[in-house]
Image: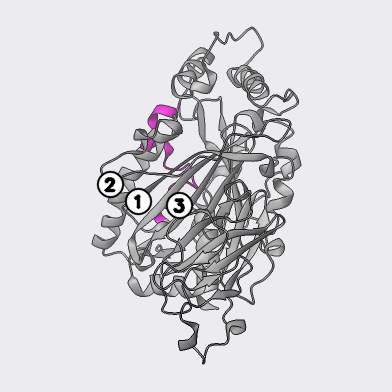
C-alpha cells in the first residue's frame, strides 16, 4: 500500500498564523496507479478473529497507548485500571513524581488485584490477602509458614512501561519498546502552543460501538462523509476544503484541519447571515448577543472574533491573539494506534478507541473534553467516565453538547458498515487518494506492525 505523493501542506506555524483554504488542485483525488487493485484495504481486518489476535500480539502489546490523564491520579496511591483485550494494568501514582503500571494479577493464583480505580496505600488481593507495597514489593503472605518455597524478594509485581506527555499517561507492555519521546514523532512540536498539560478532563463519555475499533476511528478522521452523513453542518463547515497531512517518515501521526465558519463549497450563494445562524443553532458556544456582519466583513471573521471573546472569558486569559484557525477550526491529529487528540481551542476533544474485550466486531469509543485550567492551575475534579448503555444514544449525555448529534449519526452508519463488510463479496474497501489518505496511512503503519 503506497501513500501518494502530493504538494506538501503548510507547516504548523503557517497554518496557525491564519486561515485554512487549500487550493482546489490539492483536493483532486488521483487515479489508482496502473495495476493497483481497487481493493486498497482488506475487509477481513474488520471482523476476522485471527486478525484480531494478531493485533493483540503485534499492536496492543507493542505500541504506546493512552491509559489515563495525570489529573486522574494526583495523589500517592491514586490509580486507574486500564484494560485492553486480555490485559489489565493498575496505573498508579507511587510517589509525588512517579507513576507506575503494574500487571493487574495476583502472583499467588491470578486474582485481579483491582477492578476499579480509587486510592490505596497498598495492593491487597481480595481472595487470600497477599499484599504488595506501592513500590511493587511483596509485603504480606498470609500463612507464610506454608510457602517456604516462595522468595518474597523475587515476587515483585510485573510492570509495563510508563510515559507522560501533555498531561496524558501512556503505557507499553513491551519491555524493549522505543521511548515514548521518539514514538510521538512530530506530535509534541505541533502541540507545543496548545498546552495540553494545562487542561483537565471536563467531560468523559464512552459507548460500546457496533463495529470493529478501526471502523469506529476511521469515521472520525475524514470529512469525505460529512455532506451525506451530517448535512445539517454544511452551511458552516467547509467539508471539501479540509486539509489532510501525512508526513514522510512519520509512522504514527497524521492530521486534518477542517474549516468552520464558511459554507461547504458545494453550496452556492449562501449569505453570511445563514452561516452564522446555523452555527449558532448547532454550537451553543456562539449563543448570546447577535453577531452582525458589517460591510467588508465575513461570517468566519465575526465567528472567530466571538470565539476569542468567549475563550478568553472561560479560561480567564487574554486569547485575542489566537488565529481564526485556532479559534474556529477542527484541528485533529491521530496517534497510532487509537488516540485522536485535537489541537486549537475551538473544540478541545480527545477520542480513544479500543476493542471491546475479545470481540473483533464491537469496540469502545470514548469522547473526552479537555478544558483549560484556571490561571493559577486550579481546576474542578476531573469528570468520571459515563458509560452509556446499549439502548442509549450519545445525545443522552448532555455534557457532549452538539458533538453528540454527529456521533449518533456516525454510530448508525457504522453498524451498517460492519454488517455490510460481512456481506460483501469484494475483498476489501476502496479508499480515496486524498480525502481518505489518513486511513491509508493508518493501515500502512498497521500492516508494518503486523508483519514485524
Q: Which residues are magenta?
A: 215-234
Give yes or no for residue 229 being in the magenta stretch: yes
Instruction: Characterize the local packing of mark 2: few (<14), some (14-19) or many (20 or more) Cα atoms within 10 angstroms.
Output: few
Task: Determine whether, in the image, residue 248 is placed left or right of residue 357.
Answer: right
Q: Which residue is mark 2?
A: 390
Q: From the top left corner, tell me how far across and down residue 204 is, in percent.
A: 48, 42
Q: Is residue 228 magenta?
A: yes
| Residue 405 in the figure: left or right of residue 315 | left
Task: Sort mark 3 into few (<14), some (14-19) or many (20+) by Cα contacts within 10 Å.
Answer: many
Q: Are marks 1 and 2 in contact (CB under 8 Å)?
A: yes
Residue mark closest to the camera, 3 vs 2: 2
Q: How is the image coloured?
A: one colour
- Name which residue lies at 46% across and 24% down: 235
Q: Is residue 409 visible?
A: yes
The residue to which callout 1 is attached is 208
Q: Which residue is mark 3?
A: 217
Amino acid at each position: 500500500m503506497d501513500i501518494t505523493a502530493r504538494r506538501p501542506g503548510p507547516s504548523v506555524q503557517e497554518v496557525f498564523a491564519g486561515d485554512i483554504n487549500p487550493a482546489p488542485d490539492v483536493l483532486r483525488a488521483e487515479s489508482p496507479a496502473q495495476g493497483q487493485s481497487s481493493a486498497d484495504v482488506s475487509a477481513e481486518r474488520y471482523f476476522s478473529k485471527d486478525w484480531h489476535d494478531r493485533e493483540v500480539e503485534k499492536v496492543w502489546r507493542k505500541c504506546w497507548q493512552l491509559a489515563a490523564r495525570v489529573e486522574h491520579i494526583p495523589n500517592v496511591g491514586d490509580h486507574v485500571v486500564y484494560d485492553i483485550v486480555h490485559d489489565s494494568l493498575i496505573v498508579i501514582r507511587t510517589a509525588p513524581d512517579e507513576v507506575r503500571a503494574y500487571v493487574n494479577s495476583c502472583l499467588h493464583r491470578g486474582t485481579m488485584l483491582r477492578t476499579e480505580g480509587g486510592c490505596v496505600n497498598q495492593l491487597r488481593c481480595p481472595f487470600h490477602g497477599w499484599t504488595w507495597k506501592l513500590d511493587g514489593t511483596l509485603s504480606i503472605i498470609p500463612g507464610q509458614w506454608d510457602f517456604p518455597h516462595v522468595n518474597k524478594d523475587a515476587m515483585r509485581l510485573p510492570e509495563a512501561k510508563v510515559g507522560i506527555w501533555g498531561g496524558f499517561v501512556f503505557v507499553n507492555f513491551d519491555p524493549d519498546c522505543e521511548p515514548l519521546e521518539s514514538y510521538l514523532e512530530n506530535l509534541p512540536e505541533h502541540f507545543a502552543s496548545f498546552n495540553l498539560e494545562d487542561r483537565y478532563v471536563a467531560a468523559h463519555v464512552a459507548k460500546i460501538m457496533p463495529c470493529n475499533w478501526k471502523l469506529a476511528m476511521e469515521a472520525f478522521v475524514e470529512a469525505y462523509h460529512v455532506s451525506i452523513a451530517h448535512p445539517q453542518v454544511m452551511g458552516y463547515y467547509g467539508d471539501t476544503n479540509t486539509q489532510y497531512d501525512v508526513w514522510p517518515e512519520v509512522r504514527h501521526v497524521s492530521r486534518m484541519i477542517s474549516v468552520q465558519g464558511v459554507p461547504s463549497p458545494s453550496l452556492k450563494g449562501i449569505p453570511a447571515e445563514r452561516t452564522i445562524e446555523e452555527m449558532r443553532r448547532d454550537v451553543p458556544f456562539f449563543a448570546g448577543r447577535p453577531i452582525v456582519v458589517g460591510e467588508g466583513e465575513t461570517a468566519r471573521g465575526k465567528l472567530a472574533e466571538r470565539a476569542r471573546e468567549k475563550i478568553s472569558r472561560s479560561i480567564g486569559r487574554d486569547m485575542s491573539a489566537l488565529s481564526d484557525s485556532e479559534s474556529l477550526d477542527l484541528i485533529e491529529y491521530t496517534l497510532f494506534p487509537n488516540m485522536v487528540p485535537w489541537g486549537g481551542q475551538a473544540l478541545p476533544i480527545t477520542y480513544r478507541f479500543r476493542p471491546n474485550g475479545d470481540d473483533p466486531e464491537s469496540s469502545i469509543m470514548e469522547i473526552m473534553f479537555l478544558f483549560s485550567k484556571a490561571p493559577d492551575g486550579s481546576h474542578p475534579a476531573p469528570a468520571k467516565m459515563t458509560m452509556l448503555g446499549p439502548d442509549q444514544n450519545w445525545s443522552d449525555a448532555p455534557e457532549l453538547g452538539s458533538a453528540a448529534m454527529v456521533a449518533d449519526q456516525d454510530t448508525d452508519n457504522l453498524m451498517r458498515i460492519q454488517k455490510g463488510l460481512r456481506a460483501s463479496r469484494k475483498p476489501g474497501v476502496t479508499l480515496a487518494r486524498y480525502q481518505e489518505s489518513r486511513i491509508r496511512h493508518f493501515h500502512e503503519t498497521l500492516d508494518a506492525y503486523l508483519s514485524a
